[in-house]
Image (spheres, rainbow, N blue to C red):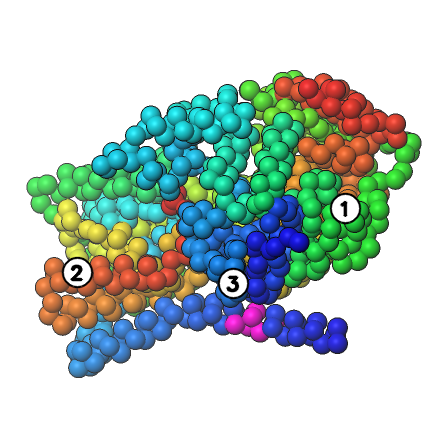
Amino acid sequence: MQENIADKGKVTFVERRKALFRSELVKSLLPLLGLVVIVVLMNILTEGSMLQPKKLKLLLSQVYYPMICATGVFFIMTLGSLDFTQGSTLGLASIVVGWISFYSIPLAILGGILTGAAIGAFNGFFHVKFKLPSFIVTICTMYLFRGLCAYLTTDAPMPASMQMKALDEDWIKVSVTLFVLLIAFIVFRFTKVGPSVKATGAGETATRFSGIRTDRLKLLTFVAAGALTGVAAFINVIKVGSITSTAGNQLETQILIALVLGGLPISGGAKVRFSNIIVGTLIYTVLNNGLVMLGYDTATQQLIKGVIFLAVVALTIDRKALKVIK
Amino acid sequence: MKKPILVAEKIDKSFGITHAVNHVSLSVDAGEIRGLIGENGSGKSTFCSLLCGIYPMDSGTFFLNGTKLDIHNQVEGNRQGVSIIVQEMGTLAGLTVAENIFLGNEGRFVKRGIKNTGAMNREAQSLLNAHGFDRIKASMMIDAHNFEDRKLIEIVKATYFKPKVVVVDETTTALSQYGREKLYGIMKSIRDDGRTVIFISHDLVEVLSHTDTISVLRDGELIDTVKSSDVSEEDLKRLMVGRELGTRYYRTDYGKPLSDEIVMSVSDVSVPGQLQDITFALRRGEILGIGGLSECGMHELGKAVFGASFDREGSVTLANGTKVDSIPDAIKHSVAYASKDRDNEALIINDSIRDNIVLPSIDELSCKGFLNYRKLNSFAVENAQHMSIKMTGVGQFVSDLSGGNKQKVVLARWLGKGSDIIVLDSPTRGIDVKVKADIYALMNELKSQNKSIIMISEEIQELLGMADRILIMKDGKINGEFHRDKTLGEEDLIAKMV
C-alpha cells in the first residue's frame, strides 16, 4: 500500500515535469510559428506577389544590415543592457566609410569598424565605469552622435566612391552576413563568452562572485557590438551610395522590436537563444515589407507595428525575472 | 470543550512542478497557539500565504468560525479577521510609521476626502505606547527605523485590530531577545483573549516553549499534530525528517593537534567603516570560526579574504606567496567563497543548476578556449549528485529550489572546483536540520582532506561545535581568540562580542 502511494507520487511528478517541458518547448517555438504565420498571412494578403523573385530580392536586401546590427545588440541585451545608439552609430560609421572609400576600400571597411568600436567603447565606458544604466547612457549619446552625423552632412550628403557601388552584389552581402552570424554563433555557443554573458544578465553580482570579470565583459560586448554596426555600415554604404544625416534613423528601435519578436526576453539572461536574431529580423522585415506592399501609409504602418510590438511584449515577458534594465 | 476557530479543508497549491501544499486539512481551536514546523520547502509559509490571500489557492477552503473565507489580498484578509507577520520585510519604505500601521485602512481618518494626519498619528502612537514601544514615533518615516523596530511596527500593524487568527511567520530570527519577549507576550495575550496564533519557526526550542500544539508538515503534506507538552525536540525532528537523526551533528573530537602549516595569512586588512587592521593566519586542515554580532564586520571579512571588497587595504597572502586582490585571483588560486547573501552573491538564481555549478570552473572545462558541452554536463551532474541536490535535472533553474537545496548548489560548485581554502559565510542560515547535518558532515570530510575552512557564523552553537579555533569580532576588530575546548561555553564567546 505504502509503495503504491509512492509510485503514484512519482508518476504525477514525471507527468508534471513533462508538461512543464512541453510548455517551455511551445514557448520557444512560438517565434518560429509567428514567422510562418506572418509569411503565410502576408502572402495571402498580397496574393503571392511577395514571393516573386524580384520582390524577394528586395526583401532580402533589407535583411542584411539590420541582422548584422541585431547580432551585436543580441549580446548587449543578453547582458540585460540596451543600446539605443545603433542608428546613429550606423550613420556615423557610414560617413567614415564613404569618406575613406575614395582612398582605399579595405581601409574604408576597417575605418567603419573602428568607428563603430570606438562608439561602443565610449558607451561601454560610461555604462561600466560610472555605473550608469546603459539605456540612459545610450539615449544621451544617441543625440550626441546623431548631432555629429547632421553636422558632417550639413552642406551635402556624404558621397561614397563609385567603386563602392560596384560592390553592391548579393553574394557579398549574403556572405558577410553569414560570416558574422557564424562567428557570433561560435562565440556564443562554444566559448565561455556565451555562459558568461547569459549569467551576467541573469545575476550580475553572483556572476562577478563566480570569478567572471563582468565589467570587462560588458565593456568588450559594447565594443564588439559597435564594431558589428561598423560592418553593417559598409553593407549600408554599398547599397545606398551616399549618406544623408538620417542614415540609420530609428534602426535601434527596429532592432529592439525585431529581437523581441524573435523571442528574446527583454531582460536578457539565461533564456535567450541565438535563433532569436534570425527569426526576429525575418519577422520584422516581412512584416515591414508586407505593410508597404499592402499600400499602407507610414503613419498606419507605425500604428500597426506599435500595436503588434506591445502585444508581443505583454504576452511573452517574464515578469519574475524583470528588474530595472541595466 | 474548545471549539475550532479555523478549519482548513484540502488546501492544495503547486508552483510549476513543485507540489508545495498537498491537500492539507487541519483545524485550530480558539484560544490556542499552534506551532507550524517542517523542513525548508515543506510548505509552512506557502500554507499561511494561502490563508492570508498572498497567493491564490489551487483548491480547498478555509473556514473561520464556520464562515467560508474569501480572501484575495492582505487587506481583505484583515477585514475577515486574518492577519500575518511575514518572514521578509513587511513594511513599506517611504511612508510614515502611522501610514504603515493603517495601510489599507486609512478610510477611518478621512473626512470629506481629506485625511486627518494628526488623528492618525495620535492613534498609532497610542497603539505603540500600549505595547511599550514608546521610543518609536508614529509620525516619523519608517526608513528612519532599524530592522528590528520595523518588525515591531509590523507586529502592531498585524494585531491592533484584534484579528481572529494571527500568523507569525519566522519573525523571531529578525528580533533581539527584547523583541522576542515582547512578541511572546503579545501571542499569549491573543490566546488569553480567546483568539488564535499560528507560529512558524525553525527554532524548535522556541516552538516547544511557546505553543500549545504543533503541526508538522513534510513535503507539502500534514504529518501529524501533537501536544507541545507531550513531545521532545528529538520527537519533532523525527517527525519533520521522517527518520531518526543522530542526536549530535556537530564534531565530537577534541584535543587533536593542528598542523603548523599556514595556508593563508591575512595582515592589516582594513575596509573603511567595516574592518580595522585584521591580522590572522589560517592553517592547513583547520576550521576557523569567526563570530560576533551581525554588524561586527565579520561578513565583510569573508569578502575581503576573497578579494571581493570594494575598498580594501592590507594584504591576503597564500602559502606560495600569491597575493589575493581580486575575485579571479582568489578563484584561480583555490579560494572559494559562499556568501551569506545566497540569492544575490552566491548564486545566479535565474540560471540553471548546470551553469551555476560550471561557471567558476569554466576555464578548466574548456579546451583551447572551446567548450565541450558533454564535459560541462557530466561535471554538473556529478557534483550535483555528490551533494544529493533534489532536482528534476541540472537544467532546472535555481530559483525553483528551496533554501537548503540552493546552498547545496553553492557547495557543489566549489567542491567541483576543488578549492583548498573555503570561506563559508553563514553556511546554515535558514536551513533545516537535515541539510544542516549534511553540511556539517561535508565540512568534516573537507577537513579530513586537509582543506581549510573559514566559517563565519552568527550561531554560537555552530562555532563551538565545529571550529578548531574561534575569532570573535567586535566593531570591525578581532576582540578575542578561543581554541577548541569542551569547557568552552556560550557565555565566554558572548562576553567578547558585546
On whether disc 2 and disc 1 are found on a single subunit, the reply is no
The magenta stretch is: A14-19
- Residue type at numbered disc 1: Ser
Residue A206 is marked as: none
Q: Say which of marks 2 and 3 sits in front.
A: 3
Q: Say which of marks 2 and 1 sits in front.
A: 1
Q: Chain of mark 2?
A: A
Q: Residue furthest left?
A: A155
Provide the residue designation for mark 3: B61
Distance from label 2 to label 3 (Cα)? 47 Å
Check disc 1: other Cα within 10 Å, few if <14, some if 14-19, many if 20+. few
- Residue type at numbered disc 3: Thr
Provide the residue designation for mark 2: A303
The answer to whether residue B159 of the structure is visible from this angle is: yes
The answer to whether residue A209 of the structure is visible from this angle is: no
Q: Residue furthest front?
A: B1
Q: Is residue A27 left or right of residue B216?
A: left
